[in-house]
Amino acid sequence: MRVAQHADAACLLVTDIDRGGAFAHLYGTWALLDASERQCIKGFVLNKFRGDAALLAPAPDMLERLTGVPTVATLPMWWQHGLPEEDGWFQLPQKAGSGARTIAVIAYPRISNLDEFQPLANLPGVRLRWVRSAGELDGADWVILPGSKHTTNDLAWLRSQGLDRAVAQHAGAGGTVLGVCGGLQMLGEALVDTHGIDGNAPGLGLLPLVTQFEPAKAVRRTHARFGAVTGAWSALAGVEVAGYEIHHGRSAQHPAMAPAPAVLPDGLGWQNPEGNVLGVYLHGLFEDPAVLHALFGAAVPTLDTVFDGLADFVDAHFPPGVLPGLISCP
């Protein structure tokens, strides 16, 4: 509200009605604001409503009598908005259908950078599945180990669920596996922590790599080009990709094992000799149009297109003249 007042902005207070208690949330939030802040609130909005909006009466009128603020719009639930969900939310739409490629993303308790998998949910012919048990990997074509906020703890959880054996069985049968950042580190032979950053742990042993955690964290945008890639990931060979790095770990070849083929420069990616297991440090692969085209022969809407669609959706569900009629904060 401090920013709103500085900008003399008229404000709408929006509640998620799907969670219940929406009118209490609106009234309670309004009541806790300072008097000067309340003057900036020009309308209430009910978001994610399922059903007939006429059934909400008389609650909007009662709320307006208590606050002097009208409920200006009710936005219906819209699952296919195209925006990424926040970390920890796994109820994305599940796509079914014959011939669909099932991609299982392991949802450990400390999963990170969840948004980079949103494009997979929007691809035709792809069914995205969030899994937390070994049985949920049955029938998966791809298994993805995503990033983690605490790799060794999530690796311990993976083992407690029996998912370590399930992933190894999937890979051993020739199934496709991808590890991203923390997931890459889990796929290696060992995680070594001499600085008390993340912890020591044996890896899953699917890539001959050792990860050493270091105090300095790599945080950068990165452009790279895939080199020679074979097997299940061969479509990525020569593809230029843009992404980002955010990791303490540095992975390198295990000195006593046959080396894994490097598929990205500067220690950013490797695959196993059989070609079905790939590990990369780059986040954002599935947000890159070139990668989506190479792997799926398809594209998904850009975020600019998604935001344009959201703007049209909001405009369609606000009564005419409400948004232009809002005045600035006194």
Image: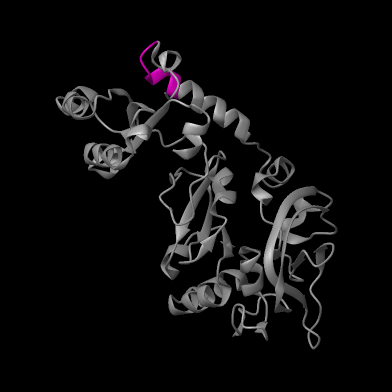
Q: Give the residue displayed 63% in from the left and 34% down from the top.
A: 302
Residue 143, above or below 293? below
Q: Which residues are magenta?
A: 314-320
Q: Give the residue displayed 49% in from the left and 66% down from the top.
A: 110
Q: Give the residue displayed 67% in from the left and 77% down from the top.
A: 188
Q: Give the residue displayed 56% in from the left and 69% down from the top.
A: 170
> Residue 210: x, y in percent?
72, 80
Residue 158, above or below 224? below
- 116 or 160, nearer to the observer: 116
> Furthest residue to the bottom?
256
- 129 or 88, nearer to the observer: 88
Judge whether residue 318 is colored magenta. Answer: yes
Quarter of image, res 226: bottom right
> Furthest residue to the top?
321
> Residue 63: x, y in percent?
20, 29
Quarter of image, res 296: top right
> Residue 17: x, y in percent?
28, 38
| Residue 227 visible in this rendered orientation of the protein | yes
Which quarter of the rendered picture does the N terminus lie within? top left
